Amino acid sequence: MTPERQAARALRRLIADAYLTDDPPPGTHRATWFITALAREPDDPAHHAMARDFLAVLDLYRRLAEALAATDDPQTGLILHGLIGHATAELMGATRDPGWRAAALDLLEPDGRTEPPIDRADAVRLFALALGLDPEPTDAPD
């Protein structure tokens, strides 16, 4: 077996392992496409590169979800929630703009410099709105 075929098999296995769980991440159809493409054309370097990129997004998605579950800071939760949305979109094939990845890595692997961009009350309200809740309804329904 050639090294390319072994690499394709390993990539297919990593993708399958990520999705054959009780709670798979988003992007099942795209993962299926990668597994099929790597099986049909195991020597295609473009498929290898795209699959590795897909696995990198899967790893970021998992790390962001774990960080969101562990945080109690609404501002950090709001940022994590938005980054998870970007990861979800990319896993589903809706975006190919990798700019969000740098923000995710900065948040997950901080360099020691942090400045809150908004005050805590605004962060709590935005986080609640991002989750579909409104903690302080200001207007009565019409």
Image (spheres, rainbow, N blue to C red):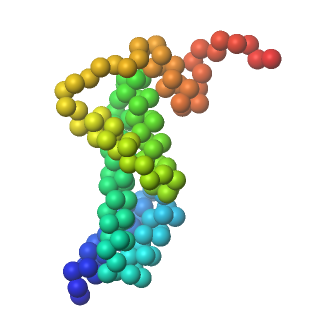
Q: Nearer the viewer, residue 48 or 15?
A: 48
On-image quarter of the N terminus: bottom left
115 up-or-down from 95: above or below: above
Q: Residue furthest right?
A: 142
24 up-or-down from 99: above or below: below
Q: Which of 98 and 39 is in front in this view?
A: 98
Instruction: Tell me the quarter of the picture where residue 117 sits.
Output: top left
Q: Residue at x 53, y 30 (%)?
A: 130
Q: Which residue is drawn at 43% across and 42% down?
A: 84
**How many labels sit on residues?**
0
Q: Which residue is drawn at 42% across and 82% down?
A: 40
On-image quarter of the C terminus: top right
Q: From the top left corner, tell me how far across and down residue 36 is, in percent.
A: 45, 76
79 up-or-down from 55: above or below: above
Q: From the top left corner, tell me how far across and down residue 132 is, in percent.
A: 59, 30
- Left or right relative to 94: residue 57: left
Q: From the top left corner, tell me how far across and down residue 47 is, in percent.
A: 37, 71
Q: Residue at x 34, y 19 (%)?
A: 116
24 up-or-down from 47: above or below: above
Q: Which residue lies furthest to the left in this view?
A: 112
Answer yes or no: is residue 66 visible: no
Instruction: Tell me the quarter of the picture where residue 14 sits.
Output: bottom left
Instruction: Tell me the quarter of the picture where residue 42 sits.
Output: bottom left
Answer yes or no: is residue 27 visible: yes
Q: From the top left corner, tell me how far across and down residue 135 is, in percent.
A: 57, 18
